[in-house]
Image (tube, rainbow, N blue to C red):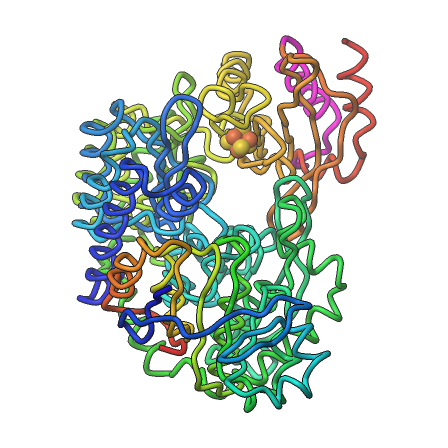
């Protein structure tokens, strides 16, 4: 699988580990529930560990863990759920999270300009044929009216 | 009036290009209905019963003559020669072709206009007092703040996918003409004890299905904190507003369900974290004020004597002046209302010919500016009294001088069953019937100040719940029925109308309204307005009359 990261198409090296599956090896992401319940084995995991957040997951609850989280995936169950835009903003602006924030799930390429402005720097589109649209739409606007992350 | 900078122009041009691409993708099947729906709504495009409907933003109700001519051009080339003005100071076209909408948006961009965020679950066009800058009861001109808010809300990356639509209104006068108590956020410019001007902030007001009067969340907000405070409210709403039920998704429900105290605590906490890094500089405010400096008024305008003479000699002219003009802060000037409520035309509609003519009149008499009111009329805000007679004559020949502003036939009316796919009942036809029943101007003037608002369904686009008389179309076993409320108001003493009783059938609604007006005429005290009487006696006498006859 490929994704757009920092405006370039790159290969995805991460794997999501479902709720009760073995962690396995390599770079993995887990749900917030798993992160909270299985933290010790995750901290011992060989390979990087990331977190997959849903709109209903409060960002406040992971503030103290951010140093140990190498990637945050924001998963859109529905493109119209705008909470993840605030999550990204909070992670970057308030909690100074500097690693990769990635949009995944059911957002649309037309939203990537806004997402990049609130601090999302990587985009895994629902279908790989959307990759060129994601790249193009990151440049939808050359001007802006308000402060945000970017 | 604000003129676009290069940034503003680039932004609307890029938005047109973006929507052109999105429309093409949709027509090629690359975007689903749902996806395109969200995108087109954010560009003002609805799909209605007969055709798409395009809602164009009238930024806080202010247009210049060039823009009005462009609206005429669009009406002529892309629509059936007319457009419709809404209660939120916007402009609607009822018959554009979907594939031509990007082209229409490009036309609009060429005169510094757009349709961005005029629908969809996002921050909408900011509205204000239609007499801003000219009224006699102003604390401060709200328009510079409206433009600052317009820019802040436009393409805000974080708040474009809110739980539900979000509307902000600003008032700068003692008398609230912008219905700030019925907006998601209402901002009222006020003076504090120290003599400083700031904002009283209201939150959680709204009309629609569950009308609620906004509550004060901040009695006095310093101007420099305007945007940080808005941001705090929006972030809390975006994160915590309900998304499980669209009828409970407005901020008013969040405020109600969490309680004002708890809601304000959250906002306050958020705001304190933002406040200091996001101040609105005094320079920015001053620079914006310069965009709204008063035009070059003739300081000698009041020395004219012809105006009084014409009034004395011409009763029709005097009546029009009485009803269709408002006091102006500059001596010798008046603000003139153009009534879009001629008896035989749908409320708020205007033809391309009228639009072009009004553009010319504004150039000739009113510094080239036109305003849209909250009751679907227009205003030429800066007319010298010496010019009033000539202007009246020309407006009269354009059918824009019906002397009914603020009266029973100055109804607000949504498109209803004729155009709207959500409607339960017709509204334009009923407005016409009521007009025909009230064809005696003297009688209408005798009734005096009254606001009749009529919506074709619960969504309440015509704000029936705050009409002195509200009429709401309901569906009863497939037939059109109407529910009546009395005593609503969107002004300073905000109130939601009380239901009169069971809904009435279509062939009875006009008679019921006439009955209500008769009860008022027979029972009012001297100089008592309709609303005052309803507040004094309650709904019973009206109820008895309306249901006795049926
Ligand atoms: S009130 Fe209802 S019928 Fe009227 S325009 Fe709004 S949605 Fe349509």
Along the line of sight, which residue is nearer the eye, B313 or A113?
Answer: A113
Q: Which residues are magenta?
A: B507-529
Residue sitting at x 59%, y 84%: B272
Residue sitting at x 36%, y 35%: B92
For the stretch drawn in magenta, the main secondary structure is helix
Residue sitting at x 25%, y 24%: B81
The x, y position of residue B279, in whole percent, is 44, 83
Along the line of sight, which residue is nearer the eye, A115 or B446?
Answer: A115
Looking at the image, residue B204 lies above or below residue B451 = below
Visible in this render: residue B180? yes
Residue B302 highlighted magenta (yes or no)? no
Query: In the image, B94: left or right of A36?
Result: left
The x, y position of residue B533, in whole percent, is 73, 35
Q: Quadrant of residue A112?
A: bottom left
Query: In the image, B23: left or right of A118?
Result: left
Looking at the image, residue B212 lies above or below residue B32 = below
Query: In the image, B184: left or right of A92?
Result: right
Query: In the image, A104: left or right of B298?
Result: right
Quadrant including the C terminus of chain B: top right
Along the line of sight, which residue is nearer the eye, B67 or B403?
Answer: B67
Residue sitting at x 66%, y 23%: B474
Looking at the image, residue B67 lies above or below residue A55 = above
The x, y position of residue B269, in whole percent, is 64, 81
Q: Quadrant of residue A44?
A: bottom right
The x, y position of residue B437, in whole percent, is 55, 12
Residue B511 highlighted magenta (yes or no)? yes
Quadrant including the N terminus of chain B: bottom left
Q: Quadrant of residue B336?
A: top left
Visible in this render: residue B200? no
């Amino acid at each position: 699988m490929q994704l757009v990261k920092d405006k370039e198409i790159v290969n995805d090296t991460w794997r999501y580990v479902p709720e009760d599956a073995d962690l396995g090896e390599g770079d993995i992401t887990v749900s917030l529930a798993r992160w909270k319940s299985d933290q010790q084995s995750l901290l011992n995991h060989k390979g990087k560990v990331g977190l997959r957040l849903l709109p209903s997951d409060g960002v406040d609850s992971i503030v103290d863990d951010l140093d140990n989280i190498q990637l945050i995936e924001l998963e859109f169950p529905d493109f119209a759920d705008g909470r993840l835009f605030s999550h990204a903003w909070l992670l970057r602006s308030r909690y100074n999270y500097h690693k990769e924030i990635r949009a995944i799930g059911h957002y649309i390429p037309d939203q990537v300009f806004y997402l990049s402005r609130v601090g999302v720097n990587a985009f895994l589109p629902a279908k790989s044929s959307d990759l060129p649209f994601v790249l193009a739409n990151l440049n939808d606007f050359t001007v802006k009216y308000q402060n945000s992350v970017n | 009036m604000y003129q676009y900078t290069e940034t503003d122009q680039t932004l609307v041009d890029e938005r047109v290009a973006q929507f052109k691409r999105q429309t093409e993708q949709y027509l090629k099947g690359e975007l689903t209905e749902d996806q395109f729906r969200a995108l087109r709504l954010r560009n003002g495009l609805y799909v209605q019963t007969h055709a798409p409907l395009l809602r164009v933003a009238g930024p806080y109700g202010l247009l210049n003559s060039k823009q009005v001519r462009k609206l005429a051009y669009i009406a002529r080339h892309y629509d059936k020669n007319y457009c419709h003005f809404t209660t939120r100071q916007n402009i609607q076209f009822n018959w554009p072709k979907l594939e031509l909408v990007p082209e229409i948006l490009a036309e609009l961009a060429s005169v510094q206009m757009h349709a961005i965020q005029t629908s969809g679950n996002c921050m909408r066009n900011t509205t204000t007092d239609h007499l801003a800058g000219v009224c006699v009861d102003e604390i401060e001109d709200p328009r510079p703040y409206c433009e600052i808010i317009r820019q802040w809300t436009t393409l805000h990356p974080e708040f474009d996918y809110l739980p539900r639509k979000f509307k902000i209104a600003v008032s700068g006068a003692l008398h609230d003409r912008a219905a700030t108590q019925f907006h998601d956020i209402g901002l009222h410019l006020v003076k504090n004890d120290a003599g400083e001007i700031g904002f009283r902030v209201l939150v959680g007001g709204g009309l629609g299905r569950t009308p609620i009067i906004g509550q004060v969340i901040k009695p006095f907000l310093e101007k420099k904190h305007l945007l940080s405070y808005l941001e705090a409210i929006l972030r809390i709403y975006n994160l915590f507003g309900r998304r499980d039920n669209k009828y409970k998704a407005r901020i008013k429900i969040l405020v109600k369900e969490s309680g004002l105290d708890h809601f304000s605590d959250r906002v306050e906490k958020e705001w304190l974290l933002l406040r200091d890094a996001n101040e609105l500089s005094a320079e920015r405010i001053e620079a914006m004020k310069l965009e709204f400096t008063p035009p070059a008024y003739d300081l000698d305008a009041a020395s004219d004597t012809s105006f009084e003479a014409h009034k004395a000699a011409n009763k029709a002219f005097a009546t029009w002046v009485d009803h269709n003009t408002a006091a102006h802060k500059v001596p010798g000037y008046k603000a003139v209302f153009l009534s879009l409520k001629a008896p035989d035309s749908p409320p708020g509609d205007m033809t391309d010919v009228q639009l072009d003519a009004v553009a010319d009149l504004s150039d000739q008499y009113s510094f080239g500016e036109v305003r849209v009111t909250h009751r679907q009329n227009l205003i030429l805000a800066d007319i010298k009294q010496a010019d009033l007679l000539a202007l009246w004559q020309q407006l009269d020949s354009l059918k824009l001088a019906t002397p009914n502003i603020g009266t029973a036939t100055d109804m607000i009316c949504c498109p209803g069953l004729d155009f709207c796919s959500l409607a339960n009942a017709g509204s334009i036809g009923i407005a016409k019937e009521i007009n025909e029943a009230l064809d005696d101007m003297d009688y209408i003037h005798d009734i005096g100040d009254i606001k009749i608002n009529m919506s074709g369904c619960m969504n309440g686009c015509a704000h029936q719940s705050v009409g002195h008389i509200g009429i709401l179309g309901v569906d009863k076993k497939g037939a059109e029925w109407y529910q009546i409320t009395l005593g609503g108001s969107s002004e300073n003493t905000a109130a939601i109308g009380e239901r009169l009783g069971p809904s009435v059938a279509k062939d009875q609604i006009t008679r019921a309204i006439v009955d209500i007006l008769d009860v008022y005429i027979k029972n009012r005290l001297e100089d008592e307005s309709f609303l005052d009487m309803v507040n004094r006696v309650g709904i019973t006498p009206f109820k008895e009359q309306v249901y006795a006859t049926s």
